[in-house]
Amino acid sequence: MNEKQRLESKQVQQSTSSAKQEKDYSQYFQTVYMPPSLKDARRRGREEVKYHKDFEIPDEFLGMGQGRKFYIRTYGCQMNEHDTEVMAGIFMELGYEHTDSVEDADVILLNTCAIRENAENKVFGELGHLKPLKLEKPDLLIGVCGCMSQEESVVNRILEKHQFVDMIFGTHNIHRLPNILNEAYLSKEMVVEVWSKEGDIIENLPKVRMGKIKAWVNIMYGCDKFCTYCIVPYTRGKERSRRPEDIIQEVRHLAAQGYKEITLLGQNVNAYGKDFDDIEYGLGDLMDELRKIDIPRIRFTTSHPRDFDDRLIEVLAKKGNMMEHIHLPVQSGSSDILKIMGRVYNREQYLELVRKIKAAIPDVSLSTDIIVGFPNETDEQFEETLSLYKEVGFETAYTFIYSPREGTPAAKMKDNVSMEVKKERLQRLNKLVNELSAEAMKKYEGQIVEVLVEGESKTNPDVLAGYTRKNKLVNFKGPKSAIGKLVNVKITEAKTWTLDGVMVEEREAAEVN
Ligand code: SAH
Ligand code: SF4
Ligand code: F3S
């Protein structure tokens, strides 16, 4: 049977199945099918997390990629970007080559995001585009992985409507990529391997990092906060922290390789270490140790206000390679809405935290995430978000219209706010965000700032681009030899989101105490 017939036969099997009352998908799987289940995901055990430090690709799979190319498209947050780096590392160890073109690829992976409906729609749209390619090139393997794969409704929809997909796997088993690929080459059916329950922590996974100047380092996985609107605790499993020694070793290694900036990753980095039974150790302690490593910049994302403690503030105030920029998602300025969101802090507590941070780090730059149009949000409650935004004086924000996610408590709430009103609120909020950003940027005019030069500007190769300590993008004139270095730039003109300037002198890495 050739591949085209294989695809058609899948469709025939599909139509037989849809005639049944109760859908039974088991016929499609040759591997063990563990359907993703939000119910199972919600049951959080206290089982111990095991650490595997000896990951190796089984010999039998080495060479699998000889003469083959892989392409990965990434949607969603930095966590997903970093997972893509790990999958790329696995592909390379298997002997695959990387390609930037879908037409050229022998394996295409869509590393998906489930945070809002439009994120999911993009992926389904892309699957529609890939179908003709698959029909043209039957040997092509197409896989869907990432957060959407952890949702049962998505898996079912792919099984029903996108039969040409060869593999679906989730966020807990990316280390199983060699086995999944192998299965997909051998199998006539779609290979689905999604684990409802998070796995252990696997160290030493190979990685192909996208940059040579900035690197991401996971410090923890999962989220236990269960904000009522959010899908992440279901798609990423329970909170599990990597051991400090593994993180410190990875950062040291990156510093030795010449990386200049590290971003520590987690969905709620302030909960780092809370799952350790044997040691009392938190993000502040970790940062205090990383601070001593000879690397110019260390950032972290994302913070949850609830677990942001004094110890961390004290360490951040030591400056050096600790950046004076904190992304601190607030979501809403109304205590009532925050309560229904399950954020476990109110407006006053958030403002109090901001006061503490500003007292310790007077030049701190704060940014945030905000959701407008949460179910039944009133005009007054929305106004409270605007007033909080001004009161804190955020320099920038990511703003979103609430998107119901199936299986979350908020999705079951009745909602009396029309989409029109939600869109108006978003526009009003964005206007304020732009105004305050422009104001904050204006203050930089005439100042000299430290920029980590990343390369040529994306829009103009004659100009270099990089970020300040407070994460502002600066475009400036300077020699190409400055790429990869920290330089001083005098700001000549502020735009709403970026700064223009000229380089004034090269400088050594910031002093690390
Ligand atoms: N862990 C981070 C956020 C991760 S998701 C935190 O708690 O701060 C990134 C942002 O997406 C969130 O901060 C929130 O503003 C937004 N978001 C999450 N779920 C959403 C939903 N259902 N609808 C709209 N925006 C959402
Ligand atoms: Fe989602 Fe809340 Fe966890 Fe952030 S803290 S990932 S918003 S559940
Ligand atoms: Fe999206 Fe998953 Fe990140 S839902 S935002 S890719 S954790």
Image (cartoon, rainbow, N blue to C red):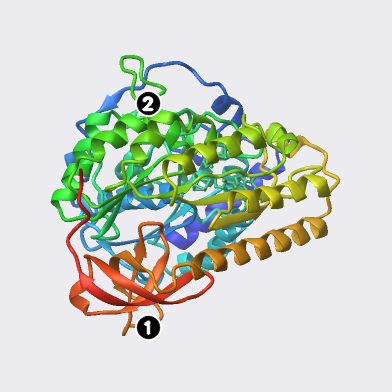
**Residue 123 or 299: which is nearer the viewer?**
299
Instruction: Determine whether, in the image, residue 282 is placed left or right of residue 426.
Output: left
Number of numbered callouts drawn: 2
Q: CA distance from mark 2 to mark 1?
A: 44 Å
Label 1: state its secondary structure.
loop
> Disc 2, ligand 2: is the CB inside 8 Å?
no
Give percent across and percent down for residue 49.
36, 22
Amino acid of disc 1: Asn
Q: Residue 273's mark?
A: 2
Q: Is residue 173 visible?
A: yes
Q: Nearer the viewer, residue 423 or 352?
A: 352
Task: Find residue 483 and report its horizontal and vertical position in percent.
Answer: 23, 70
> Where does the C terminus fall, quadrant-wise?
top left
Q: Give the residue at x 72% y 40%.
A: 334
- Residue closest to the eye, 251 or 82: 251
Q: Quadrant of ligand 1?
A: top right
Categorize mark 2 by other alpha carbons within 10 Å: few (<14), some (14-19), many (20+): many
Q: Which mark is residue 460?
A: 1
Q: Position of residue 216 (x, y in %)?
A: 32, 49
Q: Which quadrant of the rendered structure holds the N terminus?
A: bottom left
Res 200 label: none
Residue 288 vertical position relative to residue 319 in the rendered view, above or below: above
Left or right of 441, for residue 322: left
Q: Quadrant of residue 270?
A: top left
User: Would you identify the image quadrant in which residue 479 lies?
Assistant: bottom left
Q: Secondary structure at mark 2?
A: loop
Say what amino acid the circle numbered 2 marks.
Gly
User: Where residue 82 appears, x then y in whole percent?
Assistant: 36, 49
